Amino acid sequence: MRILETDPVTSSRMSRQRSRDTGVEKALRSALHAAGLRYRIHKRPVKGLRREADIVFGPAKVAVFVDGCYWHGCPEHATWPKRNSKFWREKIEKNRARDANTDARLREAGWLSVRIWEHESADLAAPRVAAIVAERRMLLQRGAKAR
């Protein structure tokens, strides 16, 4: 497969895209911290799985991923590039497949993946994540007491 070269302007723009500590990520972390939740950031939830979650709630076994609309093919905001379209479509489809694989592998290990789109408001996403973490903590505590 021959990959077309990207023009310098596009290449420069793409290289400046942050992969971690984005504004959306920081806003979500801030809202979660303000709600009293404590977590780890940019951590692999499961040993041996080379996938890093943006926010990890270890004891609750919840891994939060903040997905970019472009890079992960948001059904609401994704656009398909016109230039070098085959390459980018394949890239984004591979990202989607990797995301699904990550979710499945975490589920097999007893974890829950939570996906937040970059367009989601931290003020709306944080309470959703907090509720999921609280529910998981309660379920895992009950399971531990039942043993």
Image (cartoon, helix red, strand yellow):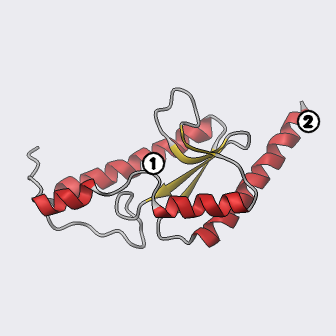
* Horizontal side, residue 15 vs residue 132: left or right: left
On residue 145, which mark appears? Answer: 2
**Quarter of the figure that contains the N terminus:** top left
Q: Position of residue 21 (x, y in %)?
A: 47, 54
Q: Residue furthest top?
A: 48
According to the picture, the residue beneath numbered tag 1 turns out to be: 99
Label 1–label 2 contact, CB within 8 A: no
Mark 1 belongs to which amino acid? Asp
What is the secondary structure assignment of the residue under circle 2?
helix
Query: Residue shown at 53%/45% (left/top)?
Result: 53
Q: Position of residue 54 (x, y in %)?
A: 53, 49
Q: Is residue 134 above or below residue 77?
A: above
Mark 2 belongs to which amino acid? Lys
Q: CA distance from mark 1 to mark 2?
A: 33 Å
For residue 30, say whether it is visible: yes
On residue 118, which mark appears? Answer: none
